[in-house]
Each structure stands twice: as structure tokens, then as C-alpha cells.
Image (spheres, rainbow, N blue to C red):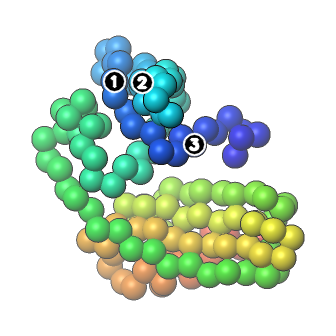
Amino acid sequence: MKEYGVSILFISKPIKLNKVFDKIESVVIKRKNKSVIVKPKIIVVATGEDDFFYKKLEVVEKDVTKIIGFGVLMSNLSMENKTTNIFFDANYAPGGYFFIGRVTKEMGIAMIVANKAKLKKPVKDYFYDFIKNVFTWF
């Protein structure tokens, strides 16, 4: 992910949001007792029920989503070692995403995380539909 310019900030907390004409220009993050300014292209918030972004973006309807997931470990994955892919597709992962990665030479993982309220069938059916129709190369 680093090769493509993706940064993941673990154990961090947003403390200030700077907007210009309704666009997020930067976010000030508190991390290891330091303030870090991030100028993101895309923000994926995985903060649980922290409502910082709800308040700052003036979202009045707060839907606390219950997420569920399903995944498998694989031994014959035709991906480069230490590679990950994340896919956002409302048809195959309603309100969530599909993740696939090669962890070691011998081990890979594929999983779906979705919004339980948006599912019209069991989550594992979405997983296998994605594998069959979209991610056909493994």
C-alpha cells in the first residue's frame, strides 16, 4: 500500500478538520502526543462510534451501523507476496468492502466486511459472488 501512496494511521485521533468550500483540505491528527497535518485525497474512517467526523461535517442523521464479515485463508493465491487489495462495491459488499491479501509465501486471506442492515442474503453469499464474478484471477 505504501508503494501507492497509502498511509494508515493507527492509534490516532482526529482533532481538527479544515474545510475549504465544503471540501476537506486537511485533518489534524493527534498521534503519539504530536499533532500531524494530513492532506488526504480519500479518508476511510475506522473509528468505531467516535462522532468527530459526524459533528465536523454536520451529519444530522447518525446511523450506528452493525457490521459483519466473512473470510477464508488460502494457500494457492496468485498474488505477489505482501500485496493487498481493497474493493468498494455496493453490489458485492453493501455498505462495506472486500479485502484480499497475500500475507506470506504460503498464506493469503480474503474477506468481506458489510453493513448487516443492507444485506439481502447471507454475507458469505456476497463473498462467493464477488470471488466468482469479480475477482476471478485467484
Q: Quadrant of the C terminus?
A: bottom right
Q: What amino acid is at disc 1?
A: Lys
Q: Earlier in the sequence, mark 2 or mark 1?
A: 1
Pinpoint residue 120: horizontal percent, then vertical percent.
Answer: 32, 79
- The local secondary structure at tag 2 comes to strand
Distance between mark 2 and mark 1 Cα atoms: 5 Å
Q: What amino acid is at disc 2?
A: Val
Residue occupying the point 43% across, 61% down: 96
Residue hosting label 2: 28
**Would you say the residues marked 2 and 1 are in contact, meaning their CB atoms lie under 8 Å apart?**
yes
Left/right placement of residue 132 relative to residue 35 reads right
Pinpoint residue 36: horizontal percent, then vertical percent.
Answer: 50, 24
Q: What amino acid is at disc 3?
A: Ile
Where 8 sits versus 127, above or below? above
Distance between mark 1 and mark 3 Cα atoms: 18 Å
Residue occupying the point 75% across, 66% down: 103
Residue hosting label 3: 8
Where 25 sits versus 92, above or below? above
- The local secondary structure at tag 1 comes to strand
Res 16 label: 1
Left/right placement of residue 130 relative to residue 14 reads right
